Amino acid sequence: MESRTVSAIYDFENRLGIFPDVDGRFKFSVLLMNGADVPRHEPRFVFFAHKIEDLRDKARQITLTTKELKLLNPTTRTSPIFRTNKDAELTKRVYRTIPILMDRARTSGGNPWEFSPWTMFHQAGDAQLFTDGEDLEKQGFKLEGAIWRKGIDRYLPLYEAKMIQAFDHRAASVMTADGNWLRHGQTQDATLVEHQNPEFAGLSRWWVGEGEVMKTKAGPKRWGFVGFKDISSATN
């Protein structure tokens, strides 16, 4: 992009079986380059095309300059994906009006909120800290709401992304499906009656000792937490 040698990028999905032996969800791209003597300042992009005719649809033709890529993704300079040029123009306007949360590309002033991203617990690296309800019950703990208690000791629920939906932190509980070879954790959606009960809390598969939870809060003073759900298949 900075050398002005990118002419166009056409992004295709294999939904129509252009490659018969490849799954329809897989994607491939056509990259068009021009010589340095013929610079292209506004390369053309088309995303999610299924056939050549889609490239001629003006509503799907998007232009992105190097400056706009820096605006949208200043750290990675990767191109976002838009289905229409209206989506692209709306997104550009938002980013011109509202700065991003943290700009790692800047040497100073890029993190005015003193934001620090981190993972509290990871199922792959912290599994030794997780305990299930059956084990806690054997140890004499009693379940109160979503928290296991015994005296002053408490085990707090480990929230998984599947337990949360937009504007709903009590969307579902997670049950263990022992018969599944993959995806052992399956959701059990909260009912309307459960949502109407202010004391209802979704139950997790795992709990973590309160002391271990407090350790994750050590270090620089944190005056607030923001959780976000960003785990799914690319086809969802």
Image: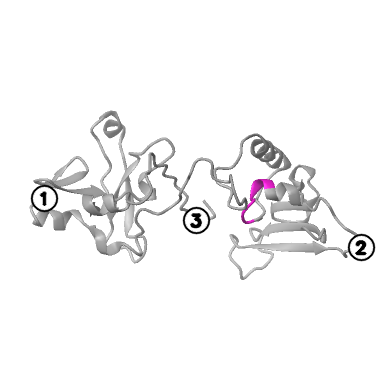
**Most common SS among magenta residues:** loop
Residue 140 horizontal side relative to residue 40, left or right: left
Callout 3, which amino acid? Ser
Which amino acid does the dot numbered 2 rest on?
Asp
Residue bearing the label numbered 1: 141
Percent from the top left, x then y, of residue 170?
33, 39
- From the viewer's side, name the closer residue of 201 and 95: 95
Relative to residue 100, is residue 70 drawn left or right? Answer: right
In this rendering, does residue 189 appear at all?
yes
Q: Nearer the viewer, residue 115 or 204?
A: 115
Could you classify mark 2 by the number of other residues whose Cα lies within 10 Å: few (under 14), some (14-19), or many (20 or more)? few
Q: Mark 3 points at which residue?
A: 233
Residue 140: x and y, percent?
7, 52
Q: What's the magenta region?
A: 71-76
Residue 51 is one of the magenta-drawn residues = no
Q: Which of marks 1 and 2 is nearer the N terminus?
A: 2
Q: Which of marks 1 and 2 is in front?
A: 2
Of callouts 3 and 2, the N-terminal one: 2
Under mark 1, the amino acid is Phe
Q: In which quarter of the image is residue 202?
A: top left
Cα separation, mark 3 vs mark 2, equals: 42 Å
Left or right, 158 with respect to 110, comes to left
Q: Is mark 1 on a helix, strand or loop?
A: loop
Q: How far apart are marks 1 and 3 (CA)?
A: 37 Å
Classed neighbour count for the residue bearing mark 3: other residues with Cα under 10 Å, few (<14), some (14–19), many (≥20): few
Q: Which of 141 and 118 is in front in this view?
A: 118
Label 2, on which residue?
A: 37
Q: Residue 43 carries which label?
A: none
First reached walking from the N terminus: tag 1 or tag 3: 1
